[in-house]
Amino acid sequence: MTHAISTGLAPSLIGLATAAFLTLGGSTPAFAQDSVVATLPQDIHFEGPVGAVGLATLYGDPKKAGVFSERVRIPAGFKIMPHWHGETRMAIVLSGTFYYANGDQWDESKFKAYPPGSFLVEPAKISHYAMAKDGEVVLQATSIGPSSTVRIEQAKK
């Protein structure tokens, strides 16, 4: 469940959010609100098939124009094959070690390990792939929709 909390801090939080939004190339109307959006951890529910990546939208709608933020849960051992997104994304590793590399073809030798607290920016149309090698990984990603993902065919071995 998401809660709207009215607070005196809202103007400064909206200012901070507006600055972040402008950095991504947007405009201020998306933040014209008078309350803070807050979601408690126990109210975050991931959607997706068992054993696959789970998504929980925290703010906005990735299918529509505007800012959105979502949690991404990657199960242990899961491989996210090469792909790219049509929009720039910013992500923070919340838990687990996220193995990430750039390129069109899967190559685990190129992985770099990103522990909790790591911050990544994926520019639009940059090919990448990832894995939760050592255990479950949870990321928080923010972008400006509409979101798109283009999968990259892998060379036959």
Image (cartoon, helix red, strand yellow):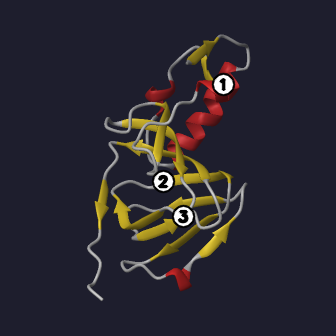
For mark 1, what is the residue? 40
Residue under the point 52% across and 46% down: 72
Question: In what element is the residue under mark 2?
Answer: strand
- The amino acid type found where label 3 is placed reads Gly
Residue 118, image quadrant: bottom right
Tag 3 secondary structure: loop
| x then y, percent, for residue 110 | 54, 82
Percent position of residue 85, x then y? 36, 58
CA distance for labels 3 and 2: 23 Å
Which callout, 3 or 1, points to the residue nearer the camera? 3
Q: Find residue 152 and report its horizontal and vertical position in percent.
A: 29, 70
Q: Which residue is mark 3?
A: 77
Mark 2 or 1, which is nearer the eye? 1
Q: Quadrant of the N terminus?
A: top right
Q: Please give the label number shown on residue 89.
A: 2
> Answer yes or no: do the residues labelled 2 and 1 have beta carbons within 8 Å?
no
Q: Give the CA separation, mark 2 to mark 1.
A: 23 Å
Sequence-wise first label, 3 or 2: 3
Residue at horizontal 69 percent and vertical 26 percent from the top: 12
Q: Nearer the viewer, residue 88 or 74?
A: 74
